[in-house]
Amino acid sequence: MKKFIGLLLALMPLGAMAQGDDFGLDFSLEAQKKINKQWNIGLEAEYRTRDNTKTSDRWAFGLGVDYKVAKWLKASAGYTFLYDNNKKISYYDATDDAVLDGDANEGDPKKCAQYWAPRHRFNVSLTFDKKLFGDFKFSLRERWQYTYRPAHTVSERWSYLDNACDGKEKTYSGKGKNVLRSRLQIEFDKKGLAVTPYINAELFNAWSLQKVRYHVGLDWKISRQHSLGAFYRYQSVRDDDDDNEPNTHLIGLGYKFKF
């Protein structure tokens, strides 16, 4: 476990710098309670960084419930409160006065606002899983996700042309977004083995393919109640939907407690 985490920490930042992508860390804590053979309820807290780990990216707190429909089928629903560190950059277009006067070029960054604001996320999922080829478990998760970002007003924005704050309020309107997330996962789930390695790929679709996530990781069952997890994620952005989101390398570490 220590060698696996050490290898990821050593290699992933180098890969991010070599490709010009971003690199971050993700830490999570999760508590699960089994109500009966069909029902489970869970709480999760998460902290994430960006800008090569220099900037806090977000805090998240979630509540979820699972229902075992059949041995091979699980239904889930959940809510997550997200508190994000947003960075909004506007760009000059051909009709801006500064472009017409020759002080700026079309496509140059115009103004920037950085602020913390909440989002509300709801999801429902169906997960199909089956063991094939011995101890290899294959699973497909289809998840509908709706995220609402409330309107937010900043007191001023940074002007790249003036190299100073503009002293003017700017309101970013509220926005809702529906996404279909499709994840295919393969894990080596051998009975009696404390460590379960896995790989997966996940597609994010919102009328078009917006991004793809790839994971390689492992879960380590320390005891009946305690487990640790570690993973590496590469996220490839196809259509950022004006969120200025870069391709990202990320190392994740998590702890889970079962009641």
Image (cartoon, rainbow, N blue to C red):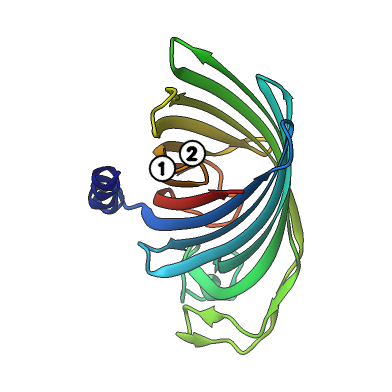
Quadrant in the picture for residue 234: top left
Q: Which mark is residue 213?
A: 2
User: Foreground residue, 137 or 118?
Assistant: 137
Pointer 1 residue? 234
Residue at 36% across / 52% down in the picture?
A: 21
Residue 183 rendering spot, x and y as whole percentages: 57, 30
Label 1 – label 2 distance at C-alpha: 6 Å
Quadrant in the picture for residue 144: top right
User: Foreground residue, 106 or 86?
Assistant: 86
The three-letter amino acid code for the residue at tag 2 is: Arg
Residue at 64% across / 60% down in the picture?
A: 61
Category of crowding for the residue at label 1, using alpha-carbon neighbours closer than 10 angstroms: few (below 14), some (14–19), many (at least 20):
many
Name which of mark 1 and mark 2 comes first in the sequence. Answer: 2
User: Across the whole image, how many numbered discs are drawn on residues?
Assistant: 2
116 lies above or below 2: below
39 horizontally vs 138: left or right: right
Residue 146 appears anywhere in the view: no
Q: Quadrant of the N terminus?
A: top left
Residue 257 rendering spot, x and y as whole percentages: 54, 50
